[in-house]
Amino acid sequence: MKYLFTSVVLLISFFTLAQTKEEIIQEIKTHQASENKDFGTAETTILTEEDFKEFEELAFYPIDLKYRVTAKFIRTPDEEPFLMPTTTERLPEYVKYGEAHFTIKGKQLQLNLYKNTEPYDEPGYEDYLFLPFTDLTSGDGSYGGGRFLDARIPEGETIVLDFNKAYNPYCAYNAKYSCPIPPEENDLLIRIEAGVKAFGKH
């Protein structure tokens, strides 16, 4: 009876895990559909008029959950604010808020997360963290200027980074925008084949 109970628990755990994986994949698909809707709607698109006329959908790498990681989060409270270079003369002020340590394909990796020293105009972004990065796909499949991830300040000592939701800066689509340039310390020496590809690449 004990072994039967254990088997049932393991079976339930398996299906719970499978369902959770399915839910995560669906969440990513919903995210991608939302991105396509924003780009394909005249009121919300950032595309140039010419590109908007021809737009069908963004190109994404296949969803791959090995690029969704639970990272160790280390806060760095004594950092000095700095001016982050952008694609224009604009120099927004950020401060390094913490570090994410994680492993992908057996490689130990680290990314810094930053917080803007200026409060956001839009409510609900008080705990928003900015994560710009480059990797070995930058300029070879994904946008050469790097990509971004959104994150929130975690309550504990871990943070989930889902590179399937990595997105391009606005200037990858329209030169009128000013976009932060990822700091060199956020260059990952690995191919992150997840998230959005370079615009026009299918």
Image (cartoon, rainbow, N blue to C red):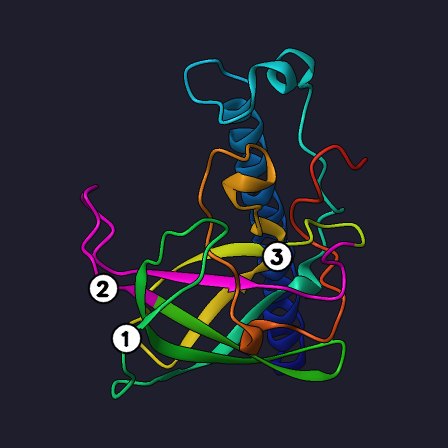
Q: Label 2 near label 3: C-beta < 8 Å?
A: no
Q: Is residue 80 above or below residue 143?
A: below
Relative placement, left or right, of 33 versus 60 is left
Q: Residues within 10 Å of mark 3 (few under 14, many from 20)?
A: many
Task: Find residue 146 and name its label.
Answer: 3
Q: Are the residues tagged 2 and 1 within 8 Å (C-beta)?
A: yes
Residue corresponding to mark 2: 117
Q: x and y percent of residue 148 in the render?
A: 52, 55
- Residue kind at label 1, given as amino acid type: Pro
The span picked out in magenta is 115-139
Q: Is residue 49 above or below residue 21?
A: above
The location of residue 8, given as percent across then percent down, is 63, 67
At 37% from the left and 68% from the top, the residue drawn is 114
Residue 188 or residue 158, whichever sits in front: 188
Q: Which x, y percent locates residue 126? A: 21, 56
Residue at (51, 39) in percent of width and height? 170
Callout 2 amino acid? Thr
Q: Which residue is mark 1?
A: 81
Q: Which mark is residue 26?
A: none
Is 74 one of the magenta-colored residues?
A: no
Query: Tag 2's secondary structure?
Result: loop
- Label whose residue precedes the other's in the sequence (2 or 1): 1
- Give percent across and percent down for residue 30: 55, 35
Quarter of the image containing the C terminus?
top right
Question: Is residue 121 shown in magenta?
Answer: yes
Report crowding for label 2: few under 14, some 14 to 19, many 20 or more residues within 10 A (C-alpha).
few
198 over 98 or under it: above or below: above
Looking at the image, tell me whether mark 3 or mark 1 is earlier in sequence order: 1
Q: Which three-letter amino acid code belongs to the residue tagged 3?
A: Gly
